[in-house]
Structure formats: C-alpha cells, structure tokens
Image: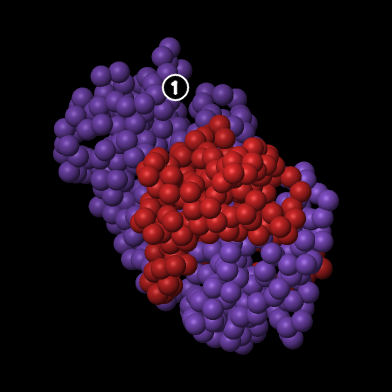
Amino acid sequence: MSKNLLILDFGSQYTQLIARRVRELNVYCEIHPYNKIPDDFNFSAVILSGSPCSVNQNDAPYPELESFNETMPILGICYGAQYLVKHFGGVVESSNKREYGRANLSFFDIKNPLFDNVKSNSQVWMSHGDTIKNLPSNFNKIASTSDIENAAFHINESNIYGLQFHPEVFHSTDGLQIINNFVVNISHCSTDWTPDSFVDSSISNIKNQVGHQKVVLGLSGGVDSSVAALLLHKAIGDNLHCIFVDNGLLRKNEFEDVLKQYESLGLNIKGVDAKEEFYKSLSGISDPELKRKAIGKTFIDVFDREANSIKDVDWLAQGTIYPDIIESVSVNGPSGHKISS
Amino acid sequence: MDHQVIKSHHNVGGLPDYMKLKIIEPLKSLFKDEVRRVGASLDLPKQILNRHPFPGPGLGIRILGEITESKIKILQEVDHIFIDGLKEFKLYDGVWQAGAIFLPVQSVGVMGDERTYENAVALRAVSSTDGMTADWCHLPHEFLAKISNRIINNVKGINRVTYDISSKPPATIEWE
C-alpha cells in the first residue's frame, strides 16, 4: 500500500501550491479542511497549511492533532507552525512589522535532515503578520533570518517540524528540496504517483465501479473531457457513449475537425448539430449574463435529450479536476475573511 | 470568469435533478498539469493536448451585444486567421489563450477609392500558468501587422483591428 500525505487546509492562498509541489515529487497527497480529518484516506504524514487567521484570535481554526498517532511526521507551514508552537505552550505574538516577501536564512542547522542539500543563505518567501516569540522547551530552533529569530523549528526526538516561511512558493529557492526532505527522507512517503501508474489504477477502478453498465460523457474538445474520455474508453470500450454538441459558437471547422479526431481515437461518439436551437435561444439577448445562461440552459436541454436517447445509461462521466473539488469543499481564503468551522 | 456556465452544468454537483444518473469523475484527483501528463501517457494527439482553453459559451461571449449568424461567421474568419497565424509563426504554444472579439463599434475606413463604415475587432492573446492571473502577450509587431492586413483584406465587414493590452487583474481574459 502506498504511503500518502495529508494536507490540512486552514485557508491559505498557497495550499494548492503545497499539493502541487508534493505531487511533483511523485507522492500522492490530498487536501482536506483542517476540521475534517478524513477516515477513508490512508496517509502517513501531514502538512499543516498557512492561514489568513491568527492563532490568537478567538475563533482561530484548530485541528485535532490528538487524532494522529504520536509518531506521525508533521510539518507546519506559517500558521501551521505557529499553531504547533501555541499548542505545545510557546508564545506567538503579532509583530509590529509584517514580514512579506523575500528573506534569506542567515542561520540554519545543517545537520537537521529537513535542511539536507539546502544552500547557505538560501532565499525564502515570507508572508506573515504574527511571529513566533518563544518556543516551548522541547523545541529546537533550526533556522533564522536577519529579522526572524524562529524561522524554523524541530520538536526534540520527533518528526514534527515547523517553518515560518513558505517552501511551496517558487521564490523559496530551496523550497522543493525542503519539502522533499520532509516528505521523502523524513516521512518515507511512496514516490510511485506517476501518470502511468495513475492510468493503470484508474482503469481498474473504473472497471470495478462501472462493470458492464453504460456511461455517457459530454465532450467539449478541451483537454479535460478528452482525457476523461480516453481513460473511460480504455476501461470500458464502447460502453462509453460520447456526445459532442455543436452549439454554433465554436471556432471555424472545429466541430468537423474535432469529431474526426475523436473518431480516429476509436471513441463511440455522436456529433449533435444543435446550432439552430442555440441561435433561437440567443435571439434578441445582449446582456452577457443572460447570454451565458441561455447557452448553458440550451446545452443542458440538448445534452439531456441525447443522453436519454441512449438505452439504459446508468452513469454520467464528468471532466471535473481537483481544483474544482477543492473549491467546493475548501475553507474560506483570505478574501472570505472568516473561516467557518 | 470564462468557465462560469460550464461550471453550472459540467462541474461539481451541477446536474439537473431529473437526470438520475450516477456520477463518475475519473480526473477528480488531478491538477491541470497532471491531466496533460496523463493525456500524453495515453497518447492523446498533440492538437488536442496543447489546445488553448476555450470558454464553454464559445464565441457567444466574444461577440459583444446581440449574437447573429452573420457576426458569428465574421468572427470565425477573424479568429481562424489569428490562430492559424500564431501556429504558422510558431507562437501558438507560447500563448496560454488567444482569440478575437467582435466589437459592436463601427468606424470609418477607406478601401481603394471608397469610404467604408464597418466593424472593428479586438485580438487578445495572454500568457498565464493557471488562468488565475494573466499578462497580455507581447507578440512581435511584424506578426500583428501581417495578421491585421490579412484580416482586413479577407474578412468582409471588418475594417479595423485592435490589440488588447490589458492584464488580468484588473481586466479579465474574456471580455464578457
């Protein structure tokens, strides 16, 4: 079984970036809200994200760290690090100057495994108002910048670390190295998440899930729905029924060209010329929102009619990708002000 | 902005109730760049794999004002010349998204000995890594000159070509 990583999201604008960095290391990770630790996701290390909140505010988001076993490797980033400090009895204060932007590590513990292969004076990206004033007694300071005394820490005889800076941001020049040190060297997460392994596992998952039932999918000519179609086709062949609607608002020759390409890929596809229906629904409308609504509604009408004309369909496939899912479950970001619990 | 309508019918939980189908979302754990990598590993043809994003409502939100079939025809021709040109000059893969916008504006021109009073179009090309922020592309002037020429000479109804030099934010990629 693969050893995966859990990212607990406290609403940072950078949370998705953490996940992308971890995935770049071929390690599978999932983002979940800080107060919904999943019970159906198997993970062996945790990253706590940043947050627009302060650990000292009344309604600050707190995770239930007690639900992890004691040896679980944890990396707190920014708010996540400050939370660990506060949780274990240290002091976090709002500093009189906000630190935002580039800084350099004036000191770091070269013997600490978190900093393997990190260059001296390494540039890091800061974005915080609060600062870590005092570390609990069993915490070791392992990095500083000229402005920030406690830029990183390690809890004695544990695999728990905290970083005041953001290693996931491109401007932290050794950031990916630091994440690699935590995820691979310290946590021993499996580095087997590759496109090929994804294709293999998702084909077998689709086969298990769908069996011999029929699936309908709307193709748009875009990358997401096309990749979804190819995967499903590999898994269930002609039981995948694709529908490609000509709404009369496509690029020149697009409908014919794309249809031909899909056919040459062996997809079971039906092209539907619904131009007139769309034009009729748009007639007399100039308001942008109303146009979008009319096009959306006509699409649903046409797609629904076509899907119903296929006998015994049980499944609707969609080209939803991870950022759509995260948006629909995520805690509010900086623009959302308050994090609801 | 450019995927709003798609979102209402094609993404998370947007199905009409009367369509009682079970949902399967094979890409729901992937980021956009991972979708491309998986597509490459499935041998998805390059023309599809590297295609620019295109909004669900299509040219419908690139024709400002009321949509008519003749405006669509004109815009399709303009868009085609622009996109083909980007490919011909090997600029296409360096651009995140490109297209033409039909402006509800008429202006005076002169073609041969005749005065014209026809529509204007805007060309838009942006660079981005995720669509969240975008900068307008600094396309070579010789390229823009050539495309402008081709459009005005070949597309009846257009006598003026402009280039959109706004970034997102504060502007958006699409005009509507």
Q: Is residue B10 above or below residue A66?
A: below
Q: Colour of chain B?
A: red
Disc 1: which chain? A
Q: Quadrant of residue A303?
A: bottom right
For disc 1, the marked residue is: A130
Residue shown at 54% from the left, 86% from the top: A237
Residue A93 location (% of width, % of height): 44, 18
Q: Quadrant of residue A176?
A: top left
Residue A278 location (% of width, % of height): 76, 62
Residue shown at 16% from the left, 32% from the top: A120
Residue A128 location (% of width, % of height): 43, 25
Q: Is residue B41 above or below residue A152?
A: below
Residue A2 vs residue A168, the one in the foreground = A168
* Residue B6 in view: no
Residue shown at 32% from the left, 56% from the top: A25
Q: Which quadrant is the C terminus of chain A positioned in?
A: top right
Coloring scheme of the render? by chain
Residue B92 location (% of width, % of height): 41, 55
10 Å neighbourhood of mark 1: few (<14), some, or many (≥20)?
Answer: many
Figure chain in purple? A
Q: Is residue B92 above or below residue A107?
A: below
A194 relative to B98 in the view: left or right? left
Q: Amino acid at mark 1?
A: Asp
* Residue A188 in view: yes
Residue shown at 49% from the left, 35% from the top: B165
* Circle 1 SS class: strand
Residue A324 vs residue A306, the one in the foreground = A306
Q: Quadrant of residue A238?
A: bottom right
Q: Is residue A38 above or below residue B139?
A: below
